[in-house]
Image (cartoon, helix red, strand yellow):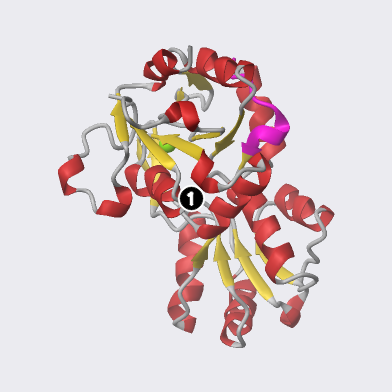
């Protein structure tokens, strides 16, 4: 299955977490998939780099990495990427110094401020960024809509309608906030998580590699494979998650992987 994909020429790896390296139990804890720990160990032993990119934006990347370590998946803080990390890099590069109106948990706002992004007050926003929120203030959404109408970019961690929970789909509150601002302004949101140019840039920056030298491994064709294809990376779809039953023939070209495997353990044969 992995013949001809050229994973031996790849110098860095990007892994999705949920449905790829781990499955979440009802308690929210991650259960590493068979072979997941060995795959990460072998990549590191070969002198190559890796990152995990998950679209969660409710906690910091460090908190996410710590949780995964506690659950038995060895990942360093610097190996963990989220849309918040790509938003930080993106805003600092393109809109340096601009006050940013953030719809995000306090810990995330603090992380962004510590990274050098000034938080906007009232009507001065030059950028609007939407991450996961539990509650929303409509007056703040109105401020955001005014700023976006004046030309501030509308950035969002993810614009997927929801994510898989143990009891079915969990609707994305971030998507609801983003959609509300997009609706009243007529402005299309710019995604900074998976899949997006901002995420491709963030991965390249973190791995210090061009995206063509990277392989992306994930369970979601529309998200992980799309991310890899966007950057010209090699792509491997694992059938252990959301796209387990997807008919490859029916996928649009930009979602079609270079290879398909049952689960991450299948990578071990090419990582000897
Ligand atoms: Mg996934």
Relative to 224, is 92 on the left or the right?
right
Q: Is residue 69 above or below residue 238?
A: above
In the rendered view of the protein, which quadrant contains the N terminus?
A: top left
Q: Classify mark 1: residues with Cα within 10 Å, few (<14), some (14-19) or many (20+).
A: many
Q: Is residue 9 above or below residue 82?
A: above
Percent across and percent down for residue 26 are 45, 25
Task: Look at the image and give the residue range highlighted in magenta.
Answer: 72-80
- For the residue pair 17 and 46, the one nearer the viewer reads as 46
Relative to 11, is 171 on the left or the right?
left
- For the residue pair 207 and 88, the one nearer the viewer reads as 207
Q: Secondary structure at mark 1?
A: loop
Q: Quadrant of residue 81?
A: top right
- For the residue pair 178 and 257, the one nearer the viewer reads as 257
Q: How many marks?
A: 1
Q: Residue at x 45, y 68 (%)?
A: 179
Q: Residue furthest bottom?
A: 150
Relative to 151, is 244 on the left or the right?
left
Residue 120 visible in rendering: yes
Percent across and percent down for residue 133 are 59, 54
Q: Which residue is mark 1?
A: 194
Q: Is residue 39 above or below residue 81?
A: above
Q: Residue at x 49, y 55 (%)?
A: 158
Ligand 1 rendered quadrant: top left
Residue 133 visible in rendering: no
Percent across and percent down for residue 109 are 74, 55
Percent across and percent down for residue 248 are 20, 41
Q: Residue at x 31, y 49 (%)?
A: 255
Q: Is residue 24 magenta?
A: no
Relative to 106, is 158 on the left or the right?
left
């Amino acid at each position: 299955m992995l013949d001809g994909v050229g994973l031996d020429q790849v110098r860095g790896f990007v892994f999705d977490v949920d449905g790829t390296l781990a499955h979440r139990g009802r308690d929210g804890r991650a259960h590493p998939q068979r072979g997941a720990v060995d795959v990460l160990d072998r990549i590191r032993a070969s002198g190559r780099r890796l990152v995990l990119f998950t679209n969660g934006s409710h906690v910091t990347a460090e908190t996410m990495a710590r949780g995964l370590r506690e659950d038995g998946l060895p990942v360093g803080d610097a190996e963990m990427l989220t849309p918040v990390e790509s938003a930080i890099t993106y805003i600092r590069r393109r809109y340096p110094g601009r006050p940013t109106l953030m719809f995000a948990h306090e810990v995330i706002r603090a992380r962004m401020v510590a990274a050098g992004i000034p938080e906007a007050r009232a009507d001065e926003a030059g950028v609007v960024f939407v991450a996961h929120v539990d509650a929303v203030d409509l007056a703040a959404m109105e401020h955001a809509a005014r700023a976006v109408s004046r030309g501030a970019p509308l950035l969002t961690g993810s614009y997927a309608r929801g994510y898989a929970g143990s009891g079915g789909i969990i609707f994305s509150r971030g998507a609801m906030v983003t959609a509300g601002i997009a609706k009243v302004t007529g402005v299309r949101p710019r995604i900074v998580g998976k899949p997006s140019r901002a995420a491709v840039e963030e991965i390249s920056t973190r791995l210090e590699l061009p995206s063509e030298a990277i392989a992306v491994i994930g369970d979601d064709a529309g998200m992980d494979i799309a991310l890899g294809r966007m950057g010209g990376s090699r792509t491997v779809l694992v059938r252990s998650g959301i796209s387990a039953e997807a008919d490859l023939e029916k996928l649009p070209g930009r979602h079609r992987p270079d290879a398909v495997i049952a689960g991450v353990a299948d990578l071990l044969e090419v990582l000897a």
